[in-house]
Image (spheres, rainbow, N blue to C red):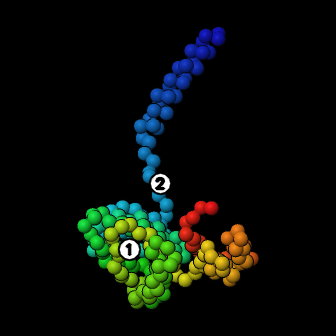
Amino acid sequence: MKTKLTTNLIILTVFFTAFFILPTLANAQPLKQFSLLGTIKGAGTHFEITDSEYLNIVLDSTEKINLRMESMPEMLTMEIGPVSSSTPSAQIALSGFEPSTTYYKYQDDYHNLTKFTTDENGGYSYTQDLSESHLVFIQPRKSTKFIKDDSTGGDCSSIGNWDNATKTCILTTDVNETIQIDDDNRWE
């Protein structure tokens, strides 16, 4: 009796596998590559973000560039680099911003600021250096506090108390803006 039950289970397992599992596996679709909303990456001259919860941005370049662009709430970030070392710069045209609106463009850190106003169609153009890769970020408001490794602590007094002995800014208020820490890169 036990042998008959085992045989029946084996037959049932083979039948189930042959008629249900194998056909399902044969029709399976490969998994799509994971991607973040509002992000695009590649090399070329034309890029479009069409699925952002913030701004859907179009970038056109006069030269082929390597680009990783992300549109997230209150910020557009772009890692821009040359494809060819013989291309010193490119004209970059961005569209998809709010029309006739002031934005703040930073390159590589928050000290390199360019304030601009979009045209009536939400566009903005500028010349991008391509001698090396750059990080460009655009925000709708200027909002950076600089904490410096000096006797005053830079902007620390507007958001906290500076302890010069430990080179520490002790925050005394909520900060809803970017903080950049500037120092001379020394380890003590």
Q: Position of residue 128 (x, y in %)?
A: 35, 76
Q: Which mark is residue 43?
A: none
Q: Vertically, is 121 above or below 73?
A: below
Q: Residue at x 46, y 86 (%)?
A: 115
* Quarter placement of the C terminus: bottom right
Query: Which amino acid does the dot numbered 1 rest on?
Result: Val
Q: Determine which residue is flagged by label 2.
A: 34
Q: What SS does tag 1 mark?
A: strand
State which quadrant residue 46 falls in.
bottom left
- Considering depth in this image, is 136 or 62 the residue closer to the camera? 136
* Quarter placement of the N terminus: top right
**Alpha-carbon span between mark 2 and mark 1:** 22 Å
Query: Which amino acid does the dot numbered 2 rest on?
Result: Phe
Q: Determine which residue is flagged by label 1.
A: 58
Q: What SS does tag 2 mark?
A: loop
Q: Position of residue 73 (x, y in %)?
A: 55, 73
Query: Neighbour class for label 2 at 10 Å: few (<14), some, many (≥20)?
Result: few
Q: Vertically, is 157 above or below 46?
A: below
Q: Residue at x 40, y 62 (%)?
A: 41
Q: Vertically, is 35 above or below 158?
A: above
Query: Neighbour class for label 1 at 10 Å: few (<14), some, many (≥20)?
Result: some
- Considering depth in this image, is 26 or 89 the residue closer to the camera? 89
- Considering depth in this image, is 161 or 89 the residue closer to the camera? 161
Q: Position of residue 86 (x, y in %)?
A: 25, 67
Q: Is residue 95 left or right of residue 45?
A: right
- N-term mark: 2 or 1: 2
